[in-house]
Image (tube, rainbow, N blue to C red):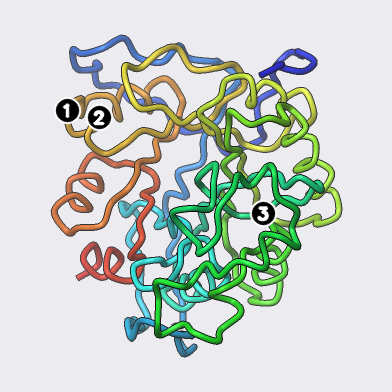
């Protein structure tokens, strides 16, 4: 994918994390520190949510009020609260608000007629009753498909059945009045190359005030974004083996099994000035291990259940 115009990376104005005095544990080389890169651990903040809304369909998990201790990671709804709801549906994100998620994680793709929609796979075969690549279909064609056809409890609910645009989700967040962090993954490779990032940048300019972070596995996509915008936090997602992070990145995100196999990675990344996110955490034991390692944020399909297991 063409990388777009390269510019010097400018770190985001986040709160600097105090350095730690302990020597890093042996292990793979730590990420190369960027002296001006800063971090925000939200240390000392106490969060409260009020779960007073009724789920749309498919689940009856509604937690009571909770208080999050300073050592707890943030909880991000992975494609929404999708344990019992279609992933990436507005219904799943509405349920994530009910369950008190701190953040929404979602993937974006560009349609044939230039709309940004929420969808993970290149094609719609797994998630809908239709077929074809998202990039080859118009928004109208995509909305003719049922994305809740495997969820009988959601029949007749357009928020579960219809593929949403990114602006549908932005409207939900604004209308909720909640302070929700939006973690937007730019999906690559795609036939549109850097046009995906350009369209996202153009869209965000119409929605000022949102708490947005951009993520990608693609180094080129992150470089393209930094050429368009110098302040939005960036997350580099990787599996393994670990390599030097791209310039301008504030957060490193890897799968749980990599962090389990290399637990010193979290401490060494913090020493180098990076936050650490991990995916996907859906059971109590894993959640406690990640919290014990002081991972900053965990992605989960079950925000309420993971919140409850961490807070007792």
* Direction from residue 56 to residue 241 in the image, left or right: left
Which quadrant holds residue 241? top left
Task: Tell me the crowding category of disc 3: few under 14, some 14 to 19, or many 20 or more residues within 10 angstroms, Cα based.
Answer: many
SS at mark 1 in the image:
helix
Residue 153: percent from left, percent from top: 40, 85
Give above or below for 25 relative to 51: above
Task: Tell me the crowding category of disc 1: few under 14, some 14 to 19, or many 20 or more residues within 10 angstroms, Cα based.
Answer: few
Q: Which mark is residue 261?
A: 1
Q: Which mark is residue 258?
A: 2
* Direction from residue 158 to residue 101 in the image, left or right: left
* Direction from residue 265 to residue 260 in the image, left or right: left
Name the residue located 58 percent from the left edge and 31 percent from the top edge: 188
Name the residue located 38 percent from the left edge and 44 percent from the top edge: 296
SS at mark 3 in the image:
strand
SS at mark 2 in the image:
helix
Quadrant where the image shows the N terminus = top right
Name the residue located 67 percent from the left edge and 54 percent from the top edge: 117
Is any part of residue 288 visible from this angle?
A: yes
Compute the Cα span from label 2 to label 1. 5 Å
Compute the Cα span from label 2 to label 3. 30 Å
Task: Tell me the crowding category of disc 2: few under 14, some 14 to 19, or many 20 or more residues within 10 angstroms, Cα based.
Answer: some
Viewer-closest of 205 and 9: 205
Name the residue located 57 percent from the left edge and 62 percent from the top edge: 180
Q: Which residue is mark 3?
A: 117
The mark nearer the N terminus, 2 or 3, is: 3
Which quadrant holds residue 23? top left
Residue 152: percent from left, percent from top: 40, 82
């Amino acid at each position: 994918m063409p990388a777009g115009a390269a510019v010097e990376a400018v770190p985001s104005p986040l709160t600097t994390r105090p350095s730690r005095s302990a020597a890093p544990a042996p292990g793979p080389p730590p990420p190369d520190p960027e002296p001006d890169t800063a971090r925000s651990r939200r240390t000392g903040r106490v969060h409260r949510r009020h779960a007073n809304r009724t789920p749309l369909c498919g689940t009856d998990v509604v937690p009571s009020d909770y208080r999050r201790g300073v050592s707890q990671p943030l909880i991000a709804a992975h494609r929404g609260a999708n344990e019992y709801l279609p992933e990436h549906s507005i219904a799943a994100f509405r349920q994530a608000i009910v369950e008190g998620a701190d953040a929404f994680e979602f993937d974006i793709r560009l349609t044939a007629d230039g709309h940004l929609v929420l969808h993970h796979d290149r094609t719609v075969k797994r998630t809908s009753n239709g077929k074809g690549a998202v990039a080859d279909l118009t928004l109208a064609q995509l909305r003719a498909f049922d994305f809740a056809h495997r969820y009988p409890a959601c029949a007749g609910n357009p928020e579960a059945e219809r593929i949403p645009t990114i602006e549908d989700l932005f409207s939900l967040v604004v209308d909720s009045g909640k302070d929700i962090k939006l973690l937007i993954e730019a999906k690559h490779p795609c036939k549109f190359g850097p046009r995906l990032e350009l369209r996202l940048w153009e869209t965000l300019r119409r929605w000022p005030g949102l708490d947005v972070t951009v993520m990608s596995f693609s180094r080129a996509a992150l470089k393209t974004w930094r050429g368009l915008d110098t302040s939005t936090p960036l997350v580099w997602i990787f599996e393994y083996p670990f390599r030097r992070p791209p310039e301008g990145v504030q957060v490193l995100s890897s799968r749980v099994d990599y962090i389990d196999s290399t637990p010193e990675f979290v401490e060494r990344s913090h020493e180098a000035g990076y936050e650490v996110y991990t995916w996907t955490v859906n059971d109590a034991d894993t959640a406690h291990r990640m919290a014990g390692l002081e991972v900053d944020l965990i992605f989960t399909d079950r925000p309420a259940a993971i919140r409850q297991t961490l807070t007792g």
